[in-house]
Amino acid sequence: MEIRIKDKILNIPIIQGGMGIGVSKGLLAGKVAQNGGAGTISFVNCGYCEDDFYIDKISANKRAFLKELKIAKDISKGSGMILVNIMNVVNKFKDYIVFLNNTDVDGIVVGAGLPLDLPKYVGKDKIIAPVISSARALNMISKKWQKLNRKPDFVVFEGPEAGGHLGFKEDELQIDVFEELKKILDVTKDIPVFIGGGFGTAEKIKLALSHGATGVQIGTGFLFTEEANLDKKVKSKLLKLKNMGKIECSILNSPVGLLARGLNTTFVNKVKQERVMSNHCIDCIKTCKKSQTQYCINDALINAIKGDMENGLFFCGTDIDNFHEVISVDKYMDLLRSGYE
């Protein structure tokens, strides 16, 4: 099976979802691409480990991304595709997009909002794709992009079972994703559509393909691979706690202003009861109301990537129910490939 997107070819219908802060970096993206899929580096505050992050986050993020992109490109050696995922709601979005356009990343994927002006800042040689939650959102983006003489090179339709930020209101969480997919396919026609949110098994890939999707986006499945940039002991502990029924995947309220899906750890339960102030706000999200927010999502996600189980926020989708041990990307993608084929 081959999927051609501009001059890039995927030989497995899988996009690895962008997971920030710091979960999907160059190693994970590179290994996914090496296996013929689309690997994704999350740009969201990827400079968190740079010494000057809290002094000059913009420079730190750009510098860190270039390091991770080189790692991914060196590993993939031209196979698959290397993407970057960035949220439309980040401050300095235009600045970051102009920067990314001048790197050798293969494509830019944008979620958490409608990237209506994205084609203004990205050359036609670069792959661009929106993450959408409905045909209505895609219609709005497509109409605006047509006026700029562009169309999406592919589309990611993220359903309500995905981990991280969701494009749904609470009363929309029970939608029939395949009914919505049908509407989206009517809009896209010849544009590849990848569906995400609970599609991390071979059986679910087969189901997605049978409903007309070009492929799937998987986040949670790759979170529990050895190459994901989260300490293996933490990954194993999260799986153990989930399997013991001590934590579960649930809907959370994010300071970004969107619903999100993650694990209801000690920290999540704490911020339901009290406000946790940030000691070093870096003004990273346009929609964050700093004087009112219950907690700093930047702090919480950085705590998670550092392995702080008490103060970390761990985004995760419903697919966690399908995983019981940490395995390599190679093994995971072999299982997916052999199963759906």
Image (cartoon, helix red, strand yellow):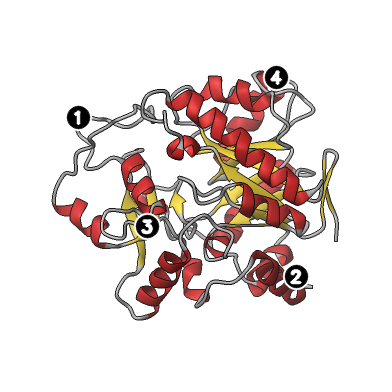
Numbered disc 2: secondary structure: helix
Badge 2 crowding class, 10 Å Cα cut-off, few under 14, some 14 to 19, many 20 or more, is some
Instruction: Place residue 124 in its image quadrant.
Output: top right
Give the residue type that dot 4 points to: Leu
Give the residue type that dot 2 points to: Arg
Across and down, in percent, residue 94 comes to 54, 20
Instruction: Place residue 31 in its image quadrant.
Output: bottom right
Mark 3 vs mark 1, foreground winner is 3
| Residue 183 visible in the displayed image | no
Instruction: Place residue 84 in its image quadrant.
Output: top right
- The circle drawn on residue 291 is 1
Give the residue type that dot 3 points to: Gly
Across and down, in percent, residue 326 comes to 53, 72
Question: What separation in Å lies between label 4 and label 2 (alpha carbons)?
Answer: 38 Å
Mark 4 vs mark 2, foreground winner is 2
Badge 3 crowding class, 10 Å Cα cut-off, few under 14, some 14 to 19, many 20 or more, is some
Of 153 and 51, the residue lying toward us: 51
Q: Quadrant of the C terminus?
A: bottom right
Q: Decide which of tag 1 and tag 4 comes sooner along the chain.
A: 4
Question: What separation in Å lies between label 2 and label 1 (alpha carbons)?
Answer: 48 Å
Residue identified by numbered label 4: 148
Q: Decide which of tag 2 and tag 1 comes sooner along the chain.
A: 1
Q: Decide which of tag 3 and tag 1 comes sooner along the chain.
A: 1
Residue identified by numbered label 3: 307
Q: Residue at x 73, y 51 (%)?
A: 75
Q: Decide which of tag 2 and tag 3 comes sooner along the chain.
A: 3
Mark 2 vs mark 3, foreground winner is 3
Numbered disc 4: secondary structure: loop
- The circle drawn on residue 337 is 2
Question: What separation in Å lies between label 1 and label 4 (alpha carbons)?
Answer: 38 Å
